[in-house]
């Protein structure tokens, strides 16, 4: 079924973190039957965790579904010069607690999304290259695909990419089909919801970010287009997170120690 905007009925948007839904899906946000957010608490970042809880409780759209898993601490573990896809998203280097949490999150997401996406016809979620480069975005894509495996729904992914992920996007071409839709972004709605996240100190993107005029989505397909497809992408220039030279466990221990000290200092100031 096509709506008056000439795009398919939007059964659900599945976004990893609070703010992803306005960064990559603003054009279809108001029309979505469900806006599903997957993660809430951020390890070692009480401000973002509390801010996300406050924001989702004040959220202006009634169709919000907040799964609210705790993030796995994997953001700085990925070497974006050589990301390795896995069934759960990306390979997490080493045998770390973060890697086990990442795998556990995948299982929980698939279970929850099977229920939430039951009966959906068109699902919009993250791209298999994770837009600018985020292992949890890629995990959400894989979880949606696993949850929707036996259904007749169509999955659509947005055309946002960065210099860190362009090779992964090219490697994902075989999973994409021919159908493309291009829509004007809804900048007024995006700015309104961004203001809520900023007021609650949990906006994770550029402070002065300017939304592009339009964005495109491409259908995932098991019958990939042999000759590809013509579609426009929004290319983000980013300095990709540098993987730590020291062991991630050591970095994490030091980060948590610093965060505990910071929290104690702030608690003593009564904030
Ligand atoms: Zn995100």
Image (spheres, rainbow, N blue to C red):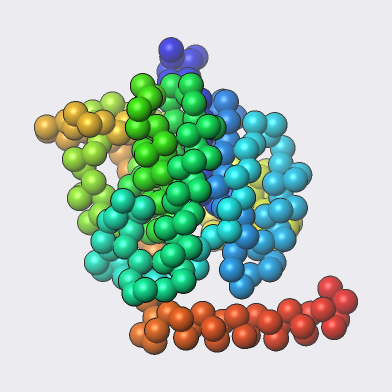
Question: Residue sitting at 59 percent across and 64 percent down?
Answer: 42
Residue 232 point in image, percent of width and height: 31, 39
Up-down relation of residue 52 to residue 242 (above or below): above
Residue in the foreground of this view, choosing between 182 and 130: 130
Number of numbered discs? 0
Which picture quadrant has residue 6?
A: top left
Residue 184, x across and y down, in percent: 47, 32
Is 64 on the left or on the right of 231, as rendered?
Answer: right
Q: Quadrant of the C terminus?
A: bottom right
Q: Is residue 7 visible?
A: no
The quarter of the picture where the N terminus appears is top left
Find residue 187 and report its image quarter: top right
Who's the residue at 38% across and 25% down the image? Answer: 151
> Going 21% across and 42% down the picture, which residue do you hit?
173
Q: Is residue 33 visible?
A: yes
Residue 267 is situated, as x and y percent measured from the top left of the image, at 82, 78
Question: Most extreme residue toward the right, as rendered?
Answer: 270
Q: Which of the 4 image quarters holds residue 46?
A: bottom right
Residue 198 screen position, x and y as percent: 68, 57
For this rendering, which residue is in front, 178 or 109?
109
The relative height of residue 207 versus residue 2 in the rendered view (above or below) is below
Residue sitting at x 67%, y 43% = 192
């Amino acid at each position: 079924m096509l709506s008056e905007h000439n795009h398919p009925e939007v059964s659900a948007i599945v976004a990893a973190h609070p703010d992803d839904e306005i960064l990559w899906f603003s054009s279809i946000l108001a029309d979505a039957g469900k806006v599903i957010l997957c993660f809430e608490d951020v390890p070692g970042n009480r401000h973002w965790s509390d801010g996300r809880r406050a924001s989702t409780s004040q959220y202006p759209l009634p169709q919000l579904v907040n799964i609210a898993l705790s993030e796995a601490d994997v953001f700085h573990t990925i070497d974006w010069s050589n990301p390795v896809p896995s069934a759960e998203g990306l390979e997490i280097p080493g045998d770390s607690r973060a890697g086990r949490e990442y795998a556990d999150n995948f299982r929980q997401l698939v279970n929850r999304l099977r229920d939430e996406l039951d009966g959906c016809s068109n699902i919009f979620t993250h791209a298999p290259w994770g837009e600018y480069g985020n292992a949890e975005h890629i995990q959400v894509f894989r979880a949606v695909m696993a949850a929707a495996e036996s259904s007749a729904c169509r999955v659509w992914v947005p055309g946002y990419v960065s210099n860190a992920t362009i090779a992964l996007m090219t490697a994902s071409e075989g999973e994409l089909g021919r159908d493309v839709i291009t829509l004007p972004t809804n900048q007024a709605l995006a700015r309104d919801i961004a203001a809520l996240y900023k007021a609650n100190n949990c906006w994770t993107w550029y402070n002065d970010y300017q939304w592009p005029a339009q964005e495109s989505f491409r259908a995932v397909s098991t019958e990939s287009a042999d000759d590809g497809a013509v579609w426009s992408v929004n290319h983000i220039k980013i300095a990709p997170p540098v993987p730590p030279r020291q062991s991630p466990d050591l970095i994490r221990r030091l980060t948590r120690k610093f965060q505990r000290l910071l929290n104690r200092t702030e608690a003593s100031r009564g904030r």
